[in-house]
Image (cartoon, rainbow, N blue to C red):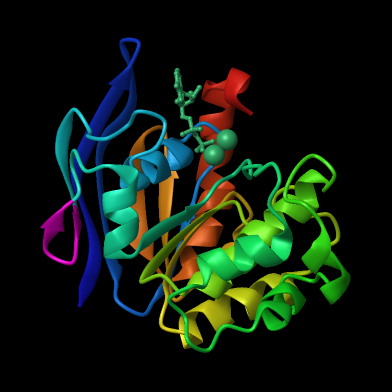
Amino acid sequence: KPLLTVNNVKLTIDERPILRGVNLVVNEGEIHAILGPNGAGKSTLASLIMGINELKSPDEGEIIFKDKLLNGLEIYERAKLGVTLAWQEPARFEGITVEEYLKLSGRNNPELDVVKCLELVGLDCTYLSRFVDDTLSGGERKRVELASILAMRPKLAVLDEPDSGIDFASMEDIANMIKTMRENGTTVLMITHREEIAEIADRATLMCDGRVVQTGNPKEIGEKFKTMCVKCEVRNPELV
Ligand code: ADP
Ligand code: MG
Ligand code: MG
């Protein structure tokens, strides 16, 4: 059963076509990977799904979540429907501790266990009293943001490069975290440019140059990525 449907989405920024008719279906309960080289348009698609960076509507096409059209909705309206995004570059919240942040994120989760959420992202309980600001490294902030999604248990979590910037995060840790999200009822759309991360998924979609090349099983899509997207990167060397 489709949870998120992206239907022929086109977007041009400064006269440059960034998305050229993207089609994607994410089914309820699945872990779906979007694989593609740098510059493929993955983060732009994530922004459109969440409505951030002034990207509230594509130029053409629809983004549909549970029979509801997301085009034009504000971020908080999408969040209310159960859509969340973990940014490629995690946010800072001056004056808020990790514990406060996780409790706020998990305020509607009756089973909230903030220590468990931290453990799943490789942080111990000493982080609870730290502030979610510049005193955390980029990698630590990224982990805290992923912990906040574990706390929140949204219907859909879009994770933009969950592995990037996290030094020494093993594949196993990331797999564990994502599988826990799924066990908690969250459907995961995971963006990555590493094919070994995509293999955690049930299905994968290959994006290249603003288009979906193919959706299929992650191993097959990973192979295709390795052979095909080398060409993309040669064609767009400034994007690598
Ligand atoms: P990916 O996440 O797959 O690496 P992005 O979605 O970040 O790709 O970027 C796709 C293309 O869109 C890139 O060429 C990028 O330079 C361009 N782009 C993204 N956002 C903007 C923007 N706000 N203004 C101009 N160009 C942008
Ligand atoms: Mg990029
Ligand atoms: Mg990106």
The spot of residue 33 in percent (x, y) is 47, 62
Looking at the image, which is closer to me, 191 or 122?
Answer: 122
Q: Residue furthest top?
A: 15
Specify whether residue 124 is in view: no
113 on left or right of 220: right
Q: Is residue 86 above or below residue 113?
A: above
Regarding residue 24, the answer to whether it shows in the image is yes
Q: Residue at x 59, y 44 (%)?
A: 88
Q: Main secondary structure of the magenta part?
A: strand
**Residue 135, percent from left and from top:** 85, 44
Examine the rendered structure and indicate whether residue 92 appears above or below residue 106: above
Name the residue rendered at 36%, 34% in the picture: 210
Tell whether position 78 is magenta. no
Q: Quadrant of the N terminus?
A: bottom left
Residue 128 on image: x %, y %: 78, 67
Magenta part of the protein: which range? Answer: 64-69
Q: Residue at x 54, y 33 (%)?
A: 231
**Quarter of the view holding residue 157:** bottom left
